[in-house]
Image: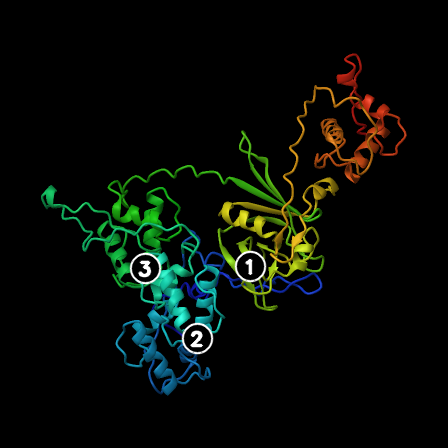
Amino acid sequence: MKRLFCVFLIVMLFATACFAGTVSAGGTDADTPDEYGDDALTEDDEGDPVPLDDNGELEEETVEARNLTSGDSGDDVAELQTRLKELNYYDGELTGSYGVRTKQAVSDFQADFELDVTGEADIQTQAMLYAALYRPLRYGCFGECVEKLQTRLMALGFYRERISGNYLESTVTAVSAFQEKNRLDVTGNADIGTQELMFSGDAVNRDDMSVPTATPAPASFLVDENAPAASVDTENVAFTKKLKNGSTGAIVKQLQTRLTEIGYYTGPVSGNFLGKTTKAVKTLQTQNGIKADGVVDETTWNLIFNDNYLVGPSDTPKPTPTPEPVPFAITVDVNNQVTTVYGRDANGEYTVIVRQMLCSTGTVKNPSPAGDWVLSGRHAQWCKFPQFGSYARYWTKINSSVAFHSVIYNSVSNTDMKTSSYEKLGRRASHGCIRLTVADAKWIFDNVGKGTVVTITNDLPADPELRDSLKLAPLDYKRQVPKSTPKPTAEPEYRSNGQPPLPLKQLKKNNSSEQVYWLQRKLTDLGYYQGKCSGTYLDGTVKAVKAFEKANGLYQDGVADVKMQELLYADVLNADSQTPAPNTK
């Protein structure tokens, strides 16, 4: 089976252009898995494998094709029917025979994409069909594509009704609200441009602060070099939406025309953003010192249309700017069920603890995958686990199968929490995801962005003091929010060369005081204690005290009596004494 046009990105085009902002996941508790497996999450073009050649460029495959019409048969007809079915134009059997239903489906597609409505799948129709990411949707449409649209609108906060798969008044209202918020023409119809923005990472959700209306683009952006200076239109060409491989329409023609004018593009001005356009954009980005991803975002658009210092294809390339460092790194400690966010210290290392949160990772049977993962920046306000009919808030994608998100909800309602998932925080309970309180999940959603490294590890030692310090407040079951608790006491001031609180008194397990805090800090300084200095004497402190007692020939009972503390603080209590170092043998 052969075709004449480029199909190099069929894999990408078949991916989840309809990423719903609600991820495929699963149910509720450890005995009933409540997250999703690897095969349940549909990836978008950031996660799908894309074929690359030896130079890291997108491969193009040029093959022969034929016009298809009534009476034809073969594998290419079956593939045509498959593609029409994927876009919800065809609901018949995949027979490989071009009959009446196939002709009608092709006609419907041609009408939606403003092609000559012939019912024959000529080369141009097939090229458009295999490049299309979405089907235009409007009032009266129904099916899986409408379900995906409603689900995405729900994730962005514009749709609150049942996911019905029927495009009726409530969907029209939600689409109109989305279009108004995102500076699009308000029609209530989910056209190609509306869906491209909706399913991209650039969509503005309902709760985002309003953005200013874009300055309308002038009728012509081309400058006549021979025109008098006073007549040259210097108004910027406004950015309106992101363009990438698979985009279509007049705005792509505008882009291709401009790329041709500045010498980066030699292909046809077709309105189809495919291989040659992608390559031209990447070359321009490389020449001008920005990330060469082939995507025309606002930065690239302004470079192409509005930058008087644009570097041409034959000019000396601009140096690539030094990227801004990522502000955070995250460690998910499976052993202690704690997620820690680190900021950068004066040396640029991620050592400053910014936030620590009790979490629920995957069960032993369905563990969270250990390793280092880099966040893609994908997130949604709500996610859905269709296997179990449950939901969660503030979903931030970690990799293709797991994410950070809140505790579980029975429906898209802030007052319909599955309370057992809150009560299980601090224990393994998910199917691989990192489950957090709503407040903690929102903090990550709001503050942690693309490029952040997330380390999931099983290798950190037990730290009971840390877990105790992160104890959750009881849940207000009526309001389904944690009950308010007193503000934690500030850590006492500790100085390694200062005297501890006097008089010294015996300290033991379950004591909480400033003296315990000093004990933990001093044992940390001497290398005996590696846990959280919380001021509460638990098993980690007992273990450290025993290690100190053993190293100094004391009775090993884990109790910090006065004699033990006098020896511990000998360097500051008695300048002539020296505190023994830990026994490293």
Q: Is residue 433 visible?
A: yes
* Quarter location, residue 465: top right
Disc 2 to disc 1, C-alpha distance: 25 Å
Residue 168 picture location, percent across and down: 40, 74
Residue in view at x 59 percent, y 62 percent: 416
Badge number at residue 509? none
Residue occupying the far left of the picture? 228
Say which of 148 and 264 sits in front: 148
Outermost residue on the front side: it is 478
Residue type at mark 1 is Asn
Res 256 quadrant in image: bottom left
- Label 2 sits on a secondary structure element that is loop
Q: Earlier in the sequence, mark 2 or mark 3?
A: 2
Q: Residue at x 73, y 28 (%)?
A: 518
Marks 3 and 1 sit apart, C-alpha to C-alpha, by 30 Å
Q: Nearer the viewer, residue 255 or 440?
A: 440
At mark 3, the secondary structure is loop
Q: Where 306 sits versus 382, above or below? A: above
In the image, residue 145 lies at what x, y percent?
A: 44, 71
Residue depicted at 79% across the width and 29% down the height: 584
The residue carrying mark 1 is: 414
At mark 1, the secondary structure is loop
